[in-house]
Amino acid sequence: MEPILMKIYENYTGDGRETLLKAYDFAKKAHANQKRASGEPYFIHPCAVASILVDLGLDVATIAGALLHDVIEDTEYKEEDIRREFGEEILTLVSGVTKLDKIVFKSQEEEEAENFRKIFVAMAKDIRVIIIKLADRLHNMRSLNFLSKERQQRMAQETLDIFAPIAGRLGISQIKCELEDLCLKYLDPEAFEFLVENIHQKLEARNNFVDFVVNEIKSILSEGNIKGEVFGRPKHFYSIYKKMKFKDKTLDQIYDLTAVRVIVGSVDECYDVFGKIHKKWKPVPGRIKDYIAIPKANMYQSLHTTVVTNFGQPFEIQIRTEEMHRTAEYGIAAHWKYKENRDTESGLDQRIAWVREVMEWQGGLKDSKEFMDTLKGDLYSAELLVFTPHGKVISLPNDATPVDFAYAIHSQVGNRCTGAKVNGKIVPLNSRLTVGDVVEIITSPNSKGPSRDWLKFIKSSSARAKIKSFYKKEMKEENVRLGKSMLEEAAKRKGYSLSEILTEGSFKKVAEKLSYTSQDEMFSSIGAGSVSVNQVIFKLIDYFRKEVPQPIVQPTITGRHTKGSVTIKGMTGLMVSFAGCCSPVPGDEITGFVTRGRGIVIHRSDCPNLQHADKERLQPAEWIVEEGGARFNAGIIIKAEDQGVALAAVSACVAEMKLSITSINGRYDKNKDAIVEVTVSLTNRNDVEVLIKKLTSHAKIYDVRRMAN
């Protein structure tokens, strides 16, 4: 009998066993003709993944999901088949692990990022998805030697960057430690072989010393009438490697190659044994850690101390209860493995709070690289433990600020933050927090939201993502309004109404080309300047014409004089020029002013110079803008902190929008604010609005407006 079948019969009974045997047969049939890179039957892989999860004590649905996890992705069977045969719960797990292989991505990096994003969405619904994925990755790493060296290193680096830290966050140390050691084997094989050889040579002498320590501690327990277990545990290779590499130590300088664990019955006994050990041996200063009173973010609890024996030999001791030991070894998997002490639902929620936090901020990050960078920063952030005024422990990255603390409490606390107190004293929001600080956040319901300046000093990846998400949501409504208005104007200039050409069919075609999920998303991207209005309007008109063939009609102009790109009603034989005071551009409402000797001068209708003009000399005017038509100059006034900021910002925005600067002048006003006047060459008013919007969003630019002398 195959190992996985033996485990199924040993660990599951009744309907659960029947479901697993059915999943086993279904997956075996689905993968019947497939081979792995090693040449072995592919079905070995889902069986191995399921076996890992049986050892972790997972439930029937998870084991079935593991057996079936590659069926949808790699075989002819579809989601409907899994749903029909095994139900919605198992389908959810299988679907959550399945890659996004039906979507075409621009790069492998983007594909990997979006797959991780999909996994996190599925994790938020059911945490068992990532447990299956971790077991899947562990077996793939165990059989990595059959792949090319390039693929070995790429997969090992991805595992070290993402999967091992996730296993650590979920407290599954068994998987985390093995993943890290396997990664080291492929990323730095020389160091791995060195550790294997040298630690093995020291093993016998080390074991003799550990046996001595274990017996001494057993005597301490016996004298105190405390029941418990004492045993040695060798440190895994990667933890030793990190100390050698990042703390610049030799193998001989690392004294905790093996730790001694003491498992007792209660928290009181943990502290009792802790005191008795310190009475027998002297503790090393700075090496005492109480993770029982203040658990780690993954709910790990234990007392750690490093002591020095009478022989001068230091070693580490960890003291914990049986329940703490289960959590340390199995992490979140203990929720299913130890059913007699199963967490309450609130306890499970506490364990996966980090996953829900990732889901809160990931929606504000569209860019795949930004999502991955933020996720890695969140996974690797070192722990700085501070307190709320009510004594709750908050874990933050090193050098975190009160703003990081505010967002760790809740997004709304961060968004409404106006000040902070640390240990009872008001401090600047960019102050650095230290271990043990008591932090109180001052909020105001009238706060306009986070400052962009906060992005310059915060340390938490999640706080950074939440601030960016705030601005994205805050600006979305305005972007939608502006984008729709720009598209309506563009349609009008082409002789259409937006409602006429924006049909269900034409939008569907545009959405496929530009990856939009709704019309508002399309409007928003136009308003934000992410896509030009011409890119969208030409596609809409093209698709509309294909749906509804249009007769070719030659345009005619009657009773109007045309000069350049404007028409003036009721006027003939006059020269037309454009006012330099307000620099009108296509899309502006315009009015013609009849001059003496200079023909008609076109002003913006809101130009201050027309307010006191002779009304009889004002004539209605309209734009006629054809594709590739005349270019116009628009003047913009920028008020900023200094000229360098304004010049850099306008140069970057103009280059991004593929416009050109025709003139630029700078000065300082009486308040010592920099005033920069820029004239930009463009073809329509929409470009001016987008440019002004981009410049206005800059943190050190105070004001941007159209020039009107």
Image: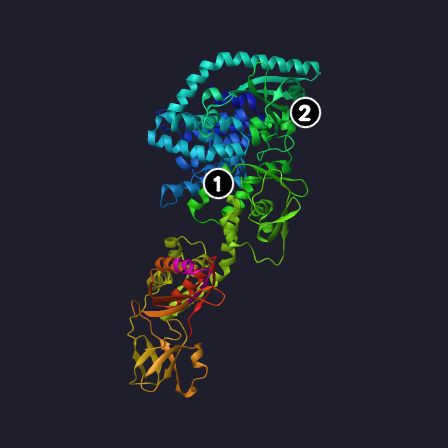
Type of the residue with mark 2: Tyr
Say what secondary structure mark 1 lies in.
Answer: helix
Q: Where does the image place residue 692, in percent across and percent down from the top left?
A: 43, 64
Residue at the far right in the pictured view = 225
Q: Where does the image place residue 433, in percent across and percent down from the top left?
A: 58, 42
Q: Is residue 26 something one can see in this rendering?
A: no
Question: Does residue 550 appear to the left or right of 416 in the view shown?
Answer: left
**Nearer to the camera, 277 or 380:** 277
Q: Is residue 236 magenta?
A: no
Q: Where does the image place residue 261, in percent across and percent down from the top left?
A: 59, 20
Residue 42 position (above or below residue 460): above
Task: Say which residue label 2 marks.
Answer: 271
- The residue stretch that appears in magenta: 637-648
Question: Image quadrant of residue 532?
Answer: bottom left
Q: Where does the image place residue 26, in percent across and percent down from the top left?
A: 45, 30
Q: How many marks?
A: 2
**Nearer to the camera, 45 or 622:** 622
Neighbour tally class for label 2: few under 14, some 14-19, many 20 plus, Cα within 10 Å: some
Q: Is residue 645 magenta?
A: yes
Proximity of marks 1 and 2: CB atoms separated by less than 8 Å: no
**Nearer to the camera, 582 or 122:** 582
Residue occupying image coordinates x 32% and y 74%:
565
**Position of the C terminus by quadrant:** bottom left
How far apart are labels 1 and 2 at the CA level?
A: 35 Å
Residue occupying image coordinates x 44% and y 53%:
517
Question: Image quadrant of residue 196?
Answer: top left
Neighbour tally class for label 1: few under 14, some 14-19, many 20 plus, Cα within 10 Å: some
Residue 220 position (above or below residue 58): above
Label drawn at residue 377: 1
* Lower sequence index among marks 1 and 2: 2
